Amino acid sequence: MQKKSYYGARNSRTNYQSRPQQRRQTSNIHPSKFVNRAVAREDVPYEPRHKFSDFALNPEIQRTLEYLELTIPTAIQDQAIVPILAGDDVIGLANTGTGKTAAFLLPIIEKLSKNPARNSVLVLTPTRELAQQIDEEFKRFSPGQKLYSTVCVGGANIGRQIRELQRNPHVIIATPGRLKDLIDRRVLVLSAVNTFVLDEADRMLDMGFIRDIQRVAEMLPNNRQTLCFSATLTPAIQKIMSEMMQDPKVISVRSGETSSHIDQNVVEVFDKIHKISVLEDMLREESFEKVLVFCETKYGAQRLADNLSKNNLPAVAIHGNKTQSQREKALKAFKTNAVKVMVATDVAARGLDIPNVSHVINFDQPKVYDDYIHRIGRTGRAGKTGKALTFVTARQ
């Protein structure tokens, strides 16, 4: 089969001159920002100061790490685990996919092994998927230690979550909206929390949760450990951290925001029909092995996934109108390669660990450049070069 070039969409068989011009999207980003040729990685390999066996972790955790064949920590793990074990407040600045979840979970599990206090750990995270992911990691690192966690997120049965909370788990992993609901119902008391984790803090602030976070912090004991992990340290994050942290240790292993290892380009289209046609042509190419497609709206994402499936391109959708079980099922199908296409809104742009995504396609342009960076960050991970394509309106 002859290899097609989609850049600029000039090689498509469609007769463009007969197409009316599509109304331009209301994106604030100039199309030139979507173009960047990938360069070979020249990253200097990080040389950790520790092995996992050097950390003051109990023998049960060490055996689990050995079973999981984890011997060398990532940069954020290497630098954050020791101060967290020492009880310090920590601000960890790290890109998604750098192992930050284990950086805070391993010390938490160690702390709980010495003092298994119930309802003592609260992890706040922006999305349901990330909450579920953290819970899976907690269970992976703590087998046989009789430590229990509960996930409290929207879109799932709140009655079941209330029953789980009544069993007094050690760790509560929650999204801000559902946590607020449980507090308002007076079924969740935070007076026993001695470890408070804010994961993807910048994303939670972007989503408008700053008041909810401040309210939760006010309800927590003053004598607690607070851990904040974020991709960026914005003035808003600095302000909120100054309010709720005591002399935090700042650890930054964040790389630059430019994704130089991701091959980025635009695809010019003339109208909606042409746009879908070009997307379908792409997805039939063998090189498009595992593709994450971003849409602006929940309705648009579902409709596109349905249309692709009808045209023999099996796809799943993940967005805010899905129940938690539906979202988990869709994500599992994509992760396990049961389908090679997942259509998503920006809910999937942060925090999710989806291995081997070959392409990210911005079917709808993001409104701001930060969202673009977070979207395309789903590809080009673990030392690989990724590809990102963004549909733009063709110039007449």
Image (cartoon, rainbow, N blue to C red):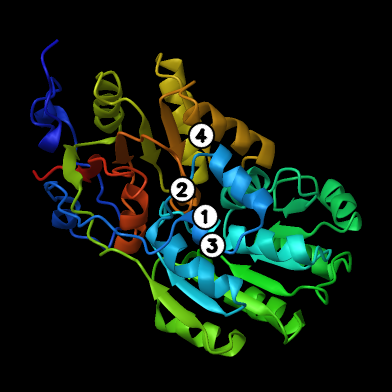
**In the image, is 376 to the left or to the right of 262?**
right
**In the image, is 232 to the left or to the right of 218?**
left
Question: In 3D space, how far apart are the residues under numbered discs 3 and 4 (Cα atoms)?
Answer: 41 Å
Question: In 3D space, how far apart are the residues under numbered discs 2 and 3 (Cα atoms)?
Answer: 11 Å
Disc 3 secondary structure class: loop
Q: Nearer the viewer, mark 3 or mark 4?
A: 3
Q: Nearer the viewer, residue 250 or 155?
A: 250
Tell me the number on the disc at residue 317. Answer: 4
Are dots 2 and 3 in contact, CB under 8 Å?
Answer: no
Residue underneath mark 3: 55
Residue farthest top in this picture: 1
Sequence order check: which comes first, mark 2 or mark 4?
Answer: 2
Percent x, y of residue 178? 72, 59
Q: For mark 3, does the 10 Å Cα neighbourhood hold few (<14), some (14 to 19), or many (20 or more) residues?
A: some
Tell me the number on the disc at residue 53. Answer: 1
Q: Nearer the viewer, mark 4 or mark 1?
A: 1
Are dots 1 and 3 in contact, CB under 8 Å?
Answer: yes
Q: For mark 2, does the 10 Å Cα neighbourhood hold few (<14), some (14 to 19), or many (20 or more) residues?
A: some
Tell me the number on the disc at residue 71. Answer: 2
Are dots 1 and 2 in contact, CB under 8 Å?
Answer: yes
Percent x, y of residue 84? 57, 72
